[in-house]
Amino acid sequence: MRIRLTSSWIIVTLAALLLIVAGCERESDVTNPATSPDDADVFLDEFGDNVTFQAFAGSKLDALDTDASVVHSGTQSLIITVPDEGNAAGTFAGGAFTTSIARDLSGYDAVTFWAKASTPATLNVVGLGNDNTGTSLYMAEMYNLELTTSWTKFIVPIPLPEKLEAEQGLFYFAEGPEDGQGYQFWIDDLQFEAIELNTPQPDIGTETVEAEIGEEIVVDMATVTYNIGGNDYILWAQQNYFSFASSNTNAVEVAEDGTITAVGLGTATITAELGSVDADGQITVTVGEGPDLPGEPAPTPTQDAGDVISIFSNAYTNASVDSWSADWDVAEYADLQIDGDDVKQYTDLVYAGIDFSSVPINASGMTHFYMNLWTPVTVDASTQFKIKLVDFGADGVYQGGDDVESELTFTTTSSPALVSGSWIKFDIPLVNFSGLATTEHVAQLIISGGNLPTVYVDNIFFYDSGQIITDPEPTTPAPTPTHDAGDVISLFSNAYDDVTVDTWSADWDEAELEDVQIAGNDTKKYTGLTVAGIEFTSETIDASEMTYFHMDFWTPDATSDPAAFKIKLVDFGADGAWGGDDDVEHELTFTANTDPALETTNWVSFDIPLQDFAGLTTTGHLAQLILSGDPNTVYIDNVYFHGGEVIPDPEPTEAAPAPTYPAANVISLFCDEYTNVPVSTWSAEWDEAFFEDVQIAGNDTKKYSISVYAGIEFLDPTIDASGMTHFRMDIWTPDDTADPAIFKIKLVDFGANGVWSGGDDVEHELTYTASTTPGLVTGSWITFDIPLSEFTGLVTSEHMAQLVISGDLSTVYVDNVLFHN
């Protein structure tokens, strides 16, 4: 990783810095004369000796030509045709004049040219030192040259001529349409001259940056100002023109070639000279330790090379990889060595896209995916690492209609388990990527972390174990139900007579269904499950006399957090039709921490009180059962409704503690003790929760049934909490609050424009467990009285608009929601 200091006015520089060779590349075997020629001409009626023009990638390749009808002097000039906006042949005109034999330009101090245009225009970029190879060291460029319809001479100074003793990049330009319209301009008498310019004033800018040991500091703000004819002209100059010095070489070193590297803890001031002239500005670099490094390389893999398709490993020949950190990912990436072994380092990792789509991998003959991972991060129950494989299908393009993908999640309790400070071996049968129905055109590997910002990876490959690997399947059937048949409405069970089910996999779902037998017992097997629609619409079910929904579930997939399995029931209402305005539904989410808890390779019995489906206010015309979630392969049996006494969840017997803050010091959203401000909604359309207004010991209270999160909005007006110091809320839950159960509180400020995604939104979310202060407890009121300063991302609080609560607690009573000081 390297630090790059940039400035907004250098936008056009990217057109030069990031361009790819179009046409011919610099010959690596060019033999330059012992003394490079000092020819000055680039174009004087003809191109100079060994000079060629190379159009930039993305430009109009035929934009440049010669013109004998419009000249400044001599017989012909260069004419450049700038395309209109949206021209399919190229979005701009631009390229580099290069020479195959490097020139000694140290005797000149500028490249000059005459130019005119068909209409007044602003030429975006001109410069020198770009040889169009991507390895240029001495680029310098000027911006926004004013062209007129008359010939004008332009001067592009050389920042330090002595550096150009062997230069192949003579001149370059880049220009786009003016107000969407193309035009033409001419260049003539393009050459190097010794003008004896006034003493330049260099400036490297003044910046304060943070670096980590081993990082390079790249100075992109360096400029040189010249006074020509009484006017100041600013030239951007590449770092290599300058000589840098460090005030603390124990922290930051400057190598002979000008490379600036953070080498030790501490602070250093970087200054510079351009030749003998001191540069203005200074860069203050504070060097921190950065992430810990592995103490030893990852174990060398032992799979036979003939059975391996390697993406990255010193042990094998690697396939072509287009990018180790795609443009669309959120991660910083660096190549490192650990005791001579190449590794990939990812920091600030949210997700990293490793793309090899130009030559996808045919892994259809492979049985396993392998990768080593090391992290210095202390892992806990909330830490996750995810591995996703994406196959682009036969058309080889993303979203071509035949893409498939699958993602696995690993935690401290998965196999393998996440650990800190040791190499972890992921040796994963490809069948575990259950959504990856094809592996003939694997094009992407995506890794992501939850609370895992720094990782090192090595030995990434597919291999053939020589064995046929299949998913495990149940060896014993689901437990036989014992409910009395008279109290049961069965959709699917060998123990009962089943009602009519129209389909176990609707046209609109995303799942593959197979009828199988487990030890002679009929079972439904779903693979590639994203969402499965089970419909009984032709004869809806009247479950109004039933009190429970039952289903048995078995999966070979990982069920550790954040894996989730969802069950939704839908009632079409008295009209029996979807979308008839009387539909109701509710979805419950189950994880490794719920009751019942998801388990891998064990039957799990869901015996759920229908009252838990809080949004299912009627059950007289049930028409759909929808299953969805992360386990992508599931076996289902004994799907039925049954009667029986329901033991209700406990509820608070006492009201939440009454706040005693002076009313003048409070902005209340919900509290009997104060006048409440307007709240737009206590359960936003976009949330996954239901709420009910209840009274506890005569005190108004909100009762939430939360599947994922509940959104409370106060948009009209938003709340100005800038004069408040604390946020308070009381909650009570009957749910298990032992680790790793969590409860989250998020506050969102919409900014001065008062709208979401308006560019000035800020937010912050706090997470609470049984071990935090306050700690989660079951069956008692918990008072969250939180200093607003703890919401560190909430840098403004003048336009508060949302409160979002989420976590593992499915039933939560809420009271006393307010800000105070």
Image: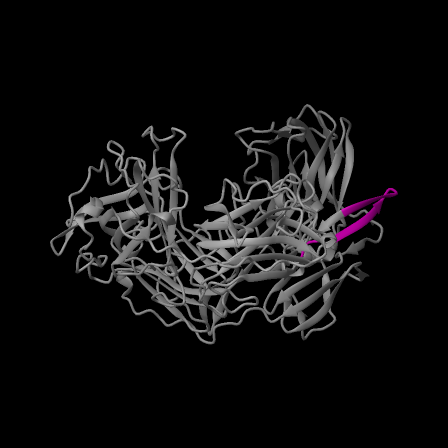
Q: Could you tell whether 254 is left or right of 339 in the image?
A: right
Q: Is residue 18 above or below residue 654?
A: above
Q: Residue furthest right?
A: 230
Q: In which quarter of the image is residue 220?
A: bottom right
Q: Which residue lies furthest to the front in this view?
A: 698
Q: Main secondary structure of the magenta part?
A: strand
* Residue 605 point in image, percent of width and height: 27, 56
Can residue 531 be seen from the camera position used here? no
Of 759 and 12, nearer the camera is 759
* Residue 387 point in image, percent of width and height: 39, 57
Magenta residues, start to end? 219-234
Q: Is residue 119 above or below residue 278?
A: above
Q: Is residue 562 above or below residue 494?
A: below
Q: Quadrant of residue 279?
A: bottom right
* Residue 13 point in image, percent of width and height: 66, 46
Q: Could you tell whether 318 is left or right of 109 in the image?
A: left
Of 359 and 411, nearer the camera is 411
Q: Residue furthest top?
A: 69
Q: In which quarter of the image is residue 816?
A: bottom right
Q: In which quarter of the image is the N terminus?
A: bottom right
* Residue 600 point in image, percent of width and height: 29, 61
Magenta segment includes 222: yes
Q: Could you tell whether 9 is left or right of 548 in the image?
A: right
Of 604 and 753, nearer the camera is 604
Q: Is residue 607 above or below residue 401?
A: below
Of 208 and 79, nearer the camera is 208
Can residue 96 be seen from the camera position used here? yes
Q: In which quarter of the image is the C terminus?
A: bottom right
> How many numbered discs sit on the rendered protein?
0
Magenta segment includes 232: yes
